Image (tube, rainbow, N blue to C red):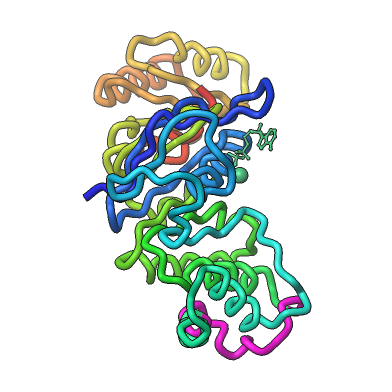
Amino acid sequence: MTFLHVDMLTKSFGSTTPVKGISFELERGSCTALLGPNGAGKTTTMRMIAGLIAPSAGRISFQGQHHSNGEYRSLIGYLPQHPAFYGWMTGQEFVMYAACLSGMSRKDARRRTTFVLEQVGLAEAAKRRIAGYSGGMKQRLGLAQALVHRPPLLLLDEPVSALDPIGRREVINLLQSLLTETTILFSTHVLPDAEEVCDRIMMMRDGEIVENGELQVLADKYRRPQLIIQVERNNAANEWLQSLRSRPFIQDAQFQGSTAQLTVNNMEEARRIILDEVSSRDIPLLSFQSGTTSLEEMFMKVVTA
Ligand SMILES: Nc1ncnc2c1ncn2[C@@H]1O[C@H](COP(=O)(O)OP(=O)(O)O)[C@@H](O)[C@H]1O
Ligand SMILES: [Mg+2]
């Protein structure tokens, strides 16, 4: 069932248009990574869905109903890219404050605050001032404030980008534990974060969605056989290596020093012809590896194309 429907959503600031008429749907209970390089329009998109800025054009509807700005706040938990905290507050005070802002009664707010602080692993630190929290703890506190009113949709804007590996691991594990309850839209500029948590990927570039689909389907679509060949550093060998670029069985070639990374159309043919030539021309081969291009390479291609 479709939970969120975004139709021709556009945002302009003066003469720049960071979001250019994008459309997509999120299924209830799905986890989608909004993936794209810096400046692609991810934050602007999330802020519109969160109701923090008004779209210049287009529609956002929840469960088939179009709401005007702000009416659907109770449906959304939002973790901004750069959350601001009052350092003098304790974690508990901060989550309590967010809960009350969302319209919960004090009694409910108190109960839910205790619950989410436990859920994000901050029960012990709950009565300490936020100023003394680590980056990972602050990000988990940000998640606690986004979760406290039990929103069916979580909007997480680069939730792990600013964290060190330990903090990142803490937050990724926490997100994995939330997957069954909540619909999640998770923005990031790095693919490995997305791969670990989400089952769908939406790639943005220059304000447009350039790919949208299941992670596995996209990975298969872009996966290509690949050869990595390294020769000794000498002119003849290098000339031969460079000549591979224009062969019919080569789709794409990248060179670095005396190493070539070749995306091939026909692995059988490529392997046979290249190895024949290596032997007949006496090419000083150092290594010859076959494999497939990674999802990371696909992402780089899509976003820089
Ligand atoms: N309030 C604003 N006024 C003018 N330009 C903005 C504003 N907010 C964002 N932009 C521009 O919109 C583009 C997309 O920004 P953003 O949505 O933050 O991208 P991302 O989150 O993918 O890095 C950027 O070029 C940014 O400078
Ligand atoms: Mg951003």
Is residue 178 toward the left or the right of residue 77 in the image?
left
Does any portion of residue 231 appear in the rendered image? no
The quarter of the displayed image where residue 54 is located: top right
- Image point (26%, 19%), residue name: 269
> Is 272 within the magenta?
no
Is most of the magenta stretch helix, strand or loop?
A: loop
Count of numbered marks = 0
Quadrant for ligand 1? Answer: top right
Q: Give above or below for 298 relative to 104.
A: above
Q: Which stretch did the figure color magenta?
A: 117-132
Residue 296: x and y, percent?
46, 40
Q: Give above or below for 227 relative to 244.
A: below
- Image point (48%, 65%), residue name: 172
Toward the left, the furthest residue is 1
> Is 122 within the magenta?
yes
In depth, the one of 255 and 280 nearer the eye is 255
- Image point (32%, 17%), residue name: 273
Q: Give above or below for 174 relative to 105.
A: above
In depth, the one of 5 and 67 nearer the eye is 67
Residue 293: x and y, percent?
39, 35
In depth, the one of 251 and 222 nearer the eye is 222
Residue 185: x and y, percent?
43, 51
